[in-house]
Amino acid sequence: MVQRWAALLRASIGRKLLMSLTGLALIGYLIVHLAGNLQIFAGEGGEAFDAYARALEENPLLPLAEVALAALFVAHIALGLRTALANREARPRRYKELASHGRRNPASMSMLVTGVIVLVFLVIHVIDFRILPRHPEGLAATVVRRLATPVGAAIYLVGVAALGLHLWHAFQSSLQTLGVNHPRYTPAIKKLGFALALLLAVGFASFPVASLAWPDLVRKAGESARAGPEPAAPIEAPAEPAR
């Protein structure tokens, strides 16, 4: 079994197949991740987002899911780097010919660069929201306050832009590697890949944009949490009867 996996990894087509499968799995994760994060806009003060975060953290399967997700990222990155370097060594002239004939686009020509940018952004993202201490008001307050600074917003926007550009080509390329390629529906797959990349990029970019435009997004939740429940009204003693 181990020998079969080793042989698959040594073959170019085997690496591409595994890279495509891990890439599609990560796209699915990004969709779920964005859907959950959009709850920061629900209600007032980020209460829905904090409740969502607590539900995830209290799930006993979270450590297992994080290990599996980390393995997906590591495998995809390693396979991507190995494939990109092998392609450059084997066909440097072929890439130039394809680019000159218009068969490549900015997304396909910058896959290695955007992949590295996304990797750096991922490390910063994990440090920001998984390692560094959170704001006392909760995760929603942590997100808003770290993205409300020009530097924080700029890092996030650059990372999201690179992610969108990477996904634009990655979606169609993954399906093509898996054999989903036909003149009849390939144009629709390309449009779907572009739309998916654009929606994910715009969705994730909405967090730094909103944090810069409305930095008080979670203030109400923080104030209500600090204030605590309202004290009960004092009970007045009954008036003494007139004598």
Image: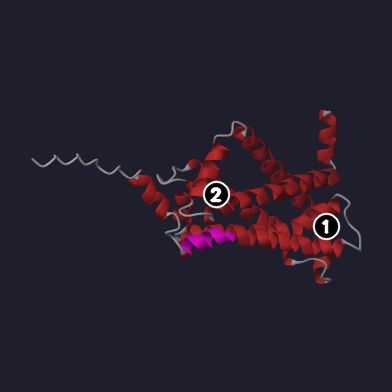
**On screen, 53 above or below 35?**
above
Pointer 1: residues within 10 angstroms few (<14), some, or many (20+)?
few
Q: Quadrant of the C terminus?
A: top left
Q: Going from the N terminus, do you reach mark 2 or mark 1 first?
A: 1
**Residue placed at 59% from the left, 31% from the top?**
60
* Outermost top residue: 1
Tell me how far mark 2 sits from mark 1, CA to CA.
35 Å
The residue to which callout 2 is attached is 125
Which span of residues is magenta-colored? Answer: 205-212
Circle number at residue 211: none
Quick one: 160 or 113, which is closer to the camera? 160
Three-letter code, disc 2: His
For residue 177: magenta?
no
Query: Which of the 4 image quadrants contains residue 218?
Result: bottom left
> What kind of element bears circle 1?
loop
Q: Position of residue 99 (x, y in %)?
A: 80, 68
- On the rendered structure, is 234 left or right of 77? left
* Outermost front residue: 243
For residue 208: magenta?
yes
**Residue placed at 82% from the left, 45% from the top?**
17
**Residue placed at 64% from the left, 40% from the top?**
70
Quick one: 92 or 51, which is closer to the camera? 51
Pointer 2: residues within 10 angstroms few (<14), some, or many (20+)?
some
Quick one: 231 or 227, which is closer to the camera? 231
Number of disc labels? 2
Three-letter code, disc 1: Arg
The residue to which callout 1 is attached is 91
**Residue placed at 48% from the left, 50% from the top?**
140
Q: Considering the whole magenta stretch, tell me its main secondary structure.
A: helix
Mark nearer the viewer, 2 or 1: 2
Q: Position of residue 135 (x, y in %)?
A: 42, 46
Viewer can see residue 213: yes
